[in-house]
Amino acid sequence: MANKVPTNIITGFLGVGKTTAILELLKNKPEGENWAVLVNEFGEIGIDGAMMTDQGALIKEVPGGCMCCTAGVPMSVGINALLRQKPDRLLIEPTGLGHPKQVIATLTSSQYQPYVDLKATIGLLDPRNLSIEKYTQNQNFNDQLASADVIIGNKVDQCTVHDVDEFNDWVTNQTPSKVFSKLVQNGSIPIEVLDIERMYDGASSQIEPHHHAHAEQEPQFELPPGEKYIRKENKGQGYFSCGWLLGAEYSFDFDELFSMLSALTAERVKAVVNTNKGCYAFNVANGVVSVNELSLEGFESRLEVIDSQLMPWNDLESILLKLAGIEL
């Protein structure tokens, strides 16, 4: 490759709005440019990539935990596949439970230095979380923010004056100082932020002892012949996930599905689903359900639930299959 590909890591904890931010960036990218996105999810069923496919970007997914596991094999497979397509920019979204320092270490290694121009790491933060011990005492939450050159306080429209003050105080007290910070809503990262140079080199290449090896090859989400659906579970770092992939021939009643998702108490829910009103992306965070229509057709529906408590997956599955009209 004659030119290095400008690359940004966009990190942040569960529910902070990383996928929404990337979708906004894709909508506002320079006309004629071809962008690529590597998506990592804690769950075993890929959701974010399905949401982004509608924006015409090159997408690769690494499901099933942190992409740096198994000595970086899953991440390297995804990056290599995207770089071969010579994108004008590469965005990398680690899981909300991931460790960005290892991702930085991989991208700055001798393997990728000739091909990747790693720019500023962008950390998304919900200012409300700075007042909640559950987040401020979480090592991943702190690691993600410490690794970021740029801090974007997202969801400011849902924040109180106290939340905004906490964010501003937090940014002011950071050592070393952050290069740039801004409060936004709906994940509206200023596109010029992507070209800010990376400042911090303190990336560790060591994987923490509690890290697990997950996917050892490229993910395959297609249903086996004759199967109506598949279910996959994952756990680690104090969280549990369960995901379902359902055949494209099955459709949900939009209103019934919305009601079910609204009633779920899980910390994080994502879905891309065929409904009687078309294909929709559902995103649940902090008890709020957001919906976006997609132009996908003939797509396999998928849903992922993440929570810090082990949930009654069998009961949830029964409800989900009933809504989809799947008889067992």
Image (tube, helix red, strand yellow):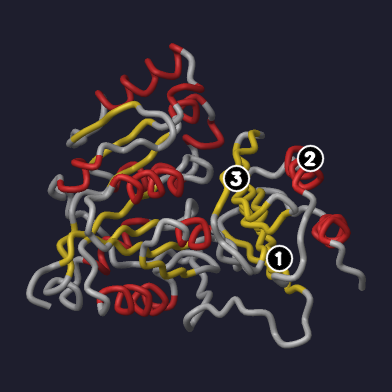
Q: Which part of the image, by quadrant, shows the N terminus? A: bottom left
Q: Residue at x 74, y 42 (%)?
A: 258
Kindly state the secondary structure of the residue where label 3 is placed: strand
Residue 244, label in figure = 1
- In front: mark 1 or mark 2? 2
Residue 20, label in figure = none
Label 1, label 2: how many angstroms apart (C-alpha)? 18 Å
141 is higher (above) or lower (below) than 93: above
Q: In the rendered image, which residue does mark 2 sit on?
A: 259
Q: Are marks 1 and 2 in contact (CB under 8 Å)?
A: no
Q: How many marks?
A: 3
Q: Residue at x 22, y 50 (%)?
A: 30
Question: Which residue is nearer to you in this view: 34 or 224?
Answer: 34
Kindly state the secondary structure of the residue where label 1 is placed: strand
- Give the mark nearer the N terminus: 1 vs 2: 1
Label 3, label 2: how many angstroms apart (C-alpha)? 13 Å
Q: Which part of the image, by quadrant, shows the C terminus? A: bottom right
Q: Residue at x 45, y 19 (%)?
A: 163
25 is higher (above) or lower (below) than 189: below
- Give the mark nearer the N terminus: 3 vs 2: 2
Residue 34 location (% of width, % of height): 26, 63
Q: In the rendered image, which residue does mark 3 sit on?
A: 283
Task: Answer with left or right where residue 314 lies relative to residue 95.
Answer: right
* Neighbourhood count class around disc 3 (C-alpha, 10 Å): few under 14, some 14–19, many 20 upward: many
Task: Answer with left or right where residue 306 lies relative to residue 113.
Answer: right
80 is higher (above) or lower (below) than 285: below
Residue 191 location (% of width, % of height): 24, 42
Q: Which residue type does callout 1 highlight?
A: Trp
Rendered image quadrant of residue 88: bottom left
Q: Which residue type does callout 2 highlight?
A: Ser
Q: Which residue type does callout 3 highlight?
A: Asn
- Give the mark nearer the N terminus: 1 vs 3: 1
